[in-house]
Image (cartoon, helix red, strand yellow):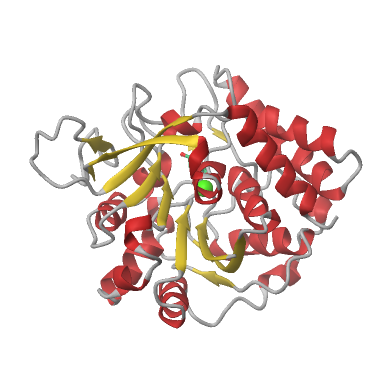
Amino acid sequence: ARRVLIDTDPGVDDALAILLALGSQRVSLHGLTIALGNGKDIRDLGSNAKLLLRLSNAAPVPVSLGDDSLATSCEGATVSRKGMEKQLVHGEDNLGNVGAKYGKCDEDYRDFHPLKAPEFIYDVCRRFPGEVSVVCIGPLNNLAEALQQHPDLPELVRDLVRREVLIMGGAFGLRRGNRTPAAEANFYHAPEAAQAVLTAKFKRVVVAGLDVTHQTEMRELRAACVAASPGSVISQFIWDVCETYMNVYHDWGETVAPAHDVVPIMYLLRPELFEAEEVRVEVETAPAALTRGMSIADWKGQWGKEPNCLVVTQIRDVAAFTAAFVAAMARLPL
Ligand code: BDR
Ligand code: CA
């Protein structure tokens, strides 16, 4: 099994992604590190991570918190649309308002790992040099901070040629932004961190942006899970946790509610299910720009720079994607 770290701001689609990793035989999860993005309270997001681990009966997996002083740059996953109230996509508790039903409680707020997330990431990569895959499904502050403190980090992550940093962030096709007209939420919340990670010495990083994540359908995934394992606690949880998120996307007039964060985890497990292209990607960091946080892919090589990313452009086989997700959920013990 591959050694994996997931850096996350759990989050409804983060929850599905984490469960996918926990249900896969190919993953040995070495930790969940928590970033602010969805949600403003790092301990509350950490408690969501703990709830998921408990629900899936996982062997102890450390949860390490990132910095909570970045809260001012994050306003939770709200999006304003003309004529509409701001809506919390992930619910008040970032688990579609069903956390309490599944036992989210104050106890979850204890026992986080003593190392802060950037140090934790470095520590795990140093203990298993060349073996750890890092999957980032929230704003990239933790990995960027780890890089700043430890410039040797890129040499420690798993075989660079195999591209073992995987990110949900940005947008590369016609669909530009969800947090602003230009920017996807994870990149918008921490554009400097995103730019630092993409231009670090990882050489190549797998990036799944909005255009590919919108090829997934949360409604499909949850229906398939319930059909495969009716009555299991995990399928009931998946059913419940998705509801608010799907309704908000529906209210926004979107035809599907995407399971964004599932994509990089699935790419790690089953890269053959996707099409991807090498390209140079950079992120706009100008403070006052309308395009702050926008990802720009130089498809024609006009900057004359080496490609730094493998951008996932297409799910080749949506049915196989769904089947792989369902199979992983069915492997979870409850
Ligand atoms: C990203 O933003 C968050 O709301 C989701 O969890 C996902 O990581 C999508 O833009
Ligand atoms: Ca996320």
How far across and how far down the image is residue 83, in percent?
49, 17
Q: Residue 245, located in which quarter of the rendered image?
A: top right
Q: Nearer the viewer, residue 215 or 14?
A: 215
**Does any portion of residue 283 appear in the rendered image?**
no
In which quadrant of the rendered image does the N terminus lie?
bottom right
Q: Residue 216, located in which quarter of the rendered image?
A: top right
Left or right relative to 149: residue 209: right
**Does any portion of residue 111 appear in the rendered image?**
yes
How far across and how far down the image is residue 305, in percent?
11, 45
Up-down relation of residue 243 to residue 233 (above or below): above
* Residue drawn at x 27%, y 53% as measured from the top left: 198
* Residue drawn at x 60%, y 43% as measured from the top left: 13
* Residue drawn at x 60%, y 21% as measured from the top left: 251
How far across and how far down the image is residue 183, in percent?
34, 35
How far across and how far down the image is residue 207, in percent?
38, 44
Left or right relative to 131: residue 288: left
Q: Nearer the viewer, residue 67 or 126?
A: 126
Up-down relation of residue 33 to residue 93 (above or below): below
* Residue drawn at x 68%, y 65% as measured from the top left: 50
Up-down relation of residue 112 to residue 307 (above or below): below
Q: Nearer the viewer, residue 263 or 37?
A: 263
Left or right relative to 90: residue 202: left
In which quadrant of the rendered image does the C terminus lie?
bottom right
